[in-house]
Image: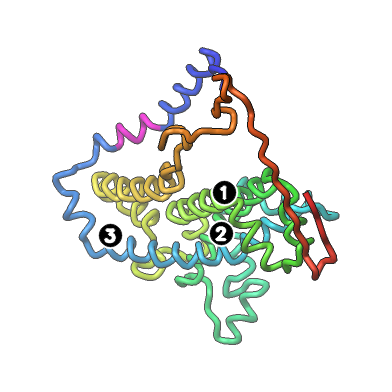
Amino acid sequence: MSPAPWWLVALAGVALAYLVVPLLFMGAKVPWASFGRVITSDSARDALWLSVRTCAAAIVIDLVLGVPAAVALSRRWRGVRVARVLVALPLSLPPVVAGLALLVTFGRKGVLGAGLEAAGVHIAFSTIAVVMAQVFVSLPFLVITLEAALRSRTQGLEQTAAGLGAGPSRVLFTITLPTVAPGLARGTALALARCLGEFGATLTFAGSLQGVTRTMPLEIYLAREADSGTALTLGVVLIVAAAVIVALTEWPGRRRRPAAEDEPASPTPTDVPDPAGQQRAAAVPVHVDGAVTARDWQGSL
């Protein structure tokens, strides 16, 4: 890999500093002496437990819906570009607008919500509404990340597997998804981090009721009005949780080193000297026959 220009490195450093320095200054202002008391309070525990439960439910829904959507968007069909724009649209919407859209659709007097209310299904201002808001804002992160990984993967593997008789579901679970596992992990982590930080859509669509709809971001917002130290402490908890989630996808796995580094190289045919003491290459004949009767295929190499 060629070295990067000096100006590129400098700008990258400025970008990194701009993102990290405010968080460091925030950490310096946290009243660490009261950290334990703050995070063990009833309101903090309720908000944290609610965030964990709703984020877990939201990420399961993201995977169930997002993986099929990403696979579909990675293929060519009429209207796929329009579908990609629609999937990415929630990323550019203010969270409050997303909450209003959900409220108009699933609220007590919404287009679909009125019928659900009549049937005894209450969504708005409930824990279900929190999950729905989190899914609405986080699903695009999973879909776009996974779809990009699918479009950039090595082509032809699925066609080869299908040609050898594998069904579509088997191709998906044994070829397609394993080849984009890093992209799936990154998309899942980004979606989960977005769920943890969701605020505007949740407040608009679900409200703020302790133990029911008040997640950690809402608890931080309310605490800021009364005690900035408490808000900073809870904010640090949220930052650490998000950092751990995203860092898990970047943790370097132990890759097997090349054989030359693990153990001494074994002699090759070119290393065998002839009687005169000179190197000579030894010919190695190889013959391979293969056949797949079900596909009427035969090959000889």
Q: Secondary structure at mark 3?
A: helix
Q: Return the mark for residue 183.
A: 1
Say which residue appears at 24% left-offset and 36% top-offset. 29
Q: Does residue 14 sit above or below 259 in this rendering? A: above
Would you say the magenta stretch is mainly helix, strand or loop?
Answer: helix
Crowding at dot 3, Cα within 10 Å, few <14 / some 14-19 / many 20+, comes out as: many
The amino acid on which the numbered mark 2 sits, given as a three-letter code, is: Gly
Name the side, left or right, on which 298 lies relative to 125.
right
Name the side, left or right, on which 132 lies relative to 172.
left
Q: Secondary structure at mark 2?
A: helix
The amino acid on which the numbered mark 3 sits, given as a three-letter code, is: Ala
Q: Earlier in the sequence, mark 2 or mark 3?
A: 3
Say which residue appears at 52% left-offset and 71% top-offset. 124
Where is residue 195 shown, x and y percent of the image? Answer: 47, 56
**Which residue is label 2 attached to?**
99
Q: Which residues are magenta?
A: 20-26
